[in-house]
Image (cartoon, rainbow, N blue to C red):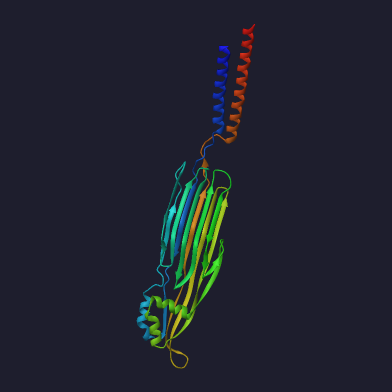
Amino acid sequence: MKRGRSGRRLVWALTAVFTAIGLVVGGAQPAQASTGGSARALAVDAVVADLEWEITTSGTAGAFSGLVDRLANAPAIDGVEVRGVEAGTPASPAGDDGMAVGPYQVGSVATFRQVNAHTERVEDAALSARSAVDGGSVQMFGTTVLDLQAVTASVAMAPDGPARVERNVAGLEVFGQRVGADPDVDTTLELTSSDLLDALEEQFPALGTTAELVGAAVSGGGSIRVVATGRDSTTPDSAEAVGLHLAISTDLSLRLCLPDGSGGCTGSVTVSAAATVLDATLAHVEVERPDALPGVPAWQIAIGAVATLVLVGLLVWAILQSLRRRRGELER
């Protein structure tokens, strides 16, 4: 009897050990991290071009001589190049990179509440990049050209499978008009001579007063043009997305004429300017596909687990058969 009980205990112990091994092996997962590839996120990449006044005079424009000198020596908008808040490829096998800054200013024309860029290798083996620009506006010549709530773009690529690409623009208004989440804008705001005089007077307060004192007739006009688009593209091994690309240009001309009493001018001053003032890319991300770290494929793990459990069953059956034969021999 003791031998029978000890044999059964041995059988149960072996069954438990081999079954546990099979379950552990069957529950193992392939490597989840990745190596190689590249990821980059850039929140703002912008150029604000110098906008210089071009001053021309004709006839006797002596009343405006001092004003002309000041206008000629002062740019309408100072140029600046901004390339900031950037994240690069994170470390392998897992890691992240990035930063957030706010408030963030682009020259004298654009201000954003916060900008951020982030890259990461995440648990499902994807290499990802994300960037966002939150709460901003573009001002030019006393006019609100653009208002936005948020611009986001993200790309994620695993060692296999398609890329996940997302981009969105929320709360975008151009010249006070709401624009959809996937903008394709090409619009122009026409400016009158009064608009231009008011804009110039903000920078040169004496302009309006001088024109009034000398009885100058004001004429002219201009425009501010805004082109805004988003884009994304994918290939088998890379993906890219831009939340919003902005191009803002202007064409202005204002003429101050000293009347001669017969419908002409004894002298005049013309102030003009034309340029692409702002060329900006907001929320730009790109990822190249990473490589998987060496690991056991899931199908091999599954087959191994099943084979282990089958072997355990056969071993238990063989042990039981051996014990039956011994019991039979002892009973004889």
As drawn, is 301 to the left or to the right of 111? right
Above or below, comparing residue 180 to residue 263 in the picture: above
Residue in the image at 35% along x and 81% along y: 66
Q: Nearer the viewer, residue 5 or 225?
A: 5
Quadrant in which residue 230 is drawn: bottom right
Farthest top residue in view? 332
Quadrant in which residue 30 is drawn: top right
Above or below, comparing residue 257 to residue 189 in the picture: below
Image quarter where the N terminus lies is: top right
Above or below, comparing residue 252 to residue 308 in the picture: below
Farthest bottom residue in view? 262
Residue in the image at 37% along x and 79% along y: 205
Farthest left residue in view? 66
Residue 54 x/y as whole percent: 42, 76
Q: Nearer the viewer, residue 255 or 160?
A: 160
Residue 120 x/y as whole percent: 47, 47
Residue in the image at 51% along x and 61% along y: 244
Q: Nearer the viewer, residue 316 or 124?
A: 316
Residue 204 x/y as whole percent: 38, 77
Residue 104 x/y as whole percent: 41, 61
